[in-house]
Amino acid sequence: MDAVLKIPTVLQQIGLEIAQNVYQGSKKEYIVYNIATETPTDFADNTPQYDEVYVQVHLFLPKDKNYLAYQQKIRQLLFEAEFGYPSVALNVVEDETRHICLETSIKQEVEKLWQTQD
């Protein structure tokens, strides 16, 4: 399964609304994810066999809410779903909102990526 399709399924256990790239809802607690980069790897006959897909998962919460349980659960769920163990790349408060960015990656066969485009 393409990483873009896998993330909402994996993170639905968190119980927050999830959007790809831009959240257009009205909740104060939500998750946005995006593909940061895709890097071809493991070449054979001058053709990449895999893509390393680097993903960012952004958690948004009210600034005073305890975020640690959410952060740990997101890391755990992604790791259990065969993503690399996520690192916390950003933790900032802007106005009334805390924004946490977790970064991870997953390796996918190139052929499977092409097949999901059909």
Image: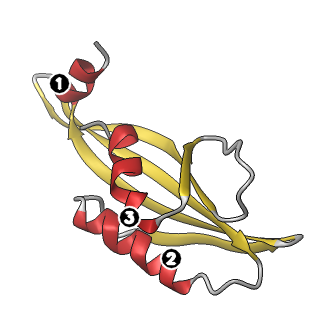
Q: Earlier in the sequence, mark 2 or mark 1?
A: 2
| Mark carried by residue 70 | 2
Identify the amino acid type marked 3. Gln
Cα separation between marks 2 and 1 = 34 Å
Identify the amino acid type marked 1. Glu
- Is residue 74 shown above or below 64? above
> Measured from the top left, where is residue 45 in percent x and y?
10, 22
Question: Foreground mark, 3 or 1?
Answer: 3
- Is residue 25 shown above or below 12? above
The front one of 96 and 58 is: 96
Secondary structure at badge 3 equals helix
Cα separation between marks 3 and 1 = 29 Å
Cα separation between marks 3 and 2 = 11 Å
| Mark carried by residue 111 | 1
- Is residue 68 shown above or below 1? below
Q: Are marks 3 and 1 in contact (CB under 8 Å)?
A: no
Secondary structure at badge 1 equals helix
| Mark carried by residue 33 | none
> Measured from the top left, where is residue 74 in percent x and y?
42, 69
Secondary structure at badge 2 equals helix
Quadrant where the image shows the C terminus: top left
What residue do we see at 29% from left, 59% from top?
83
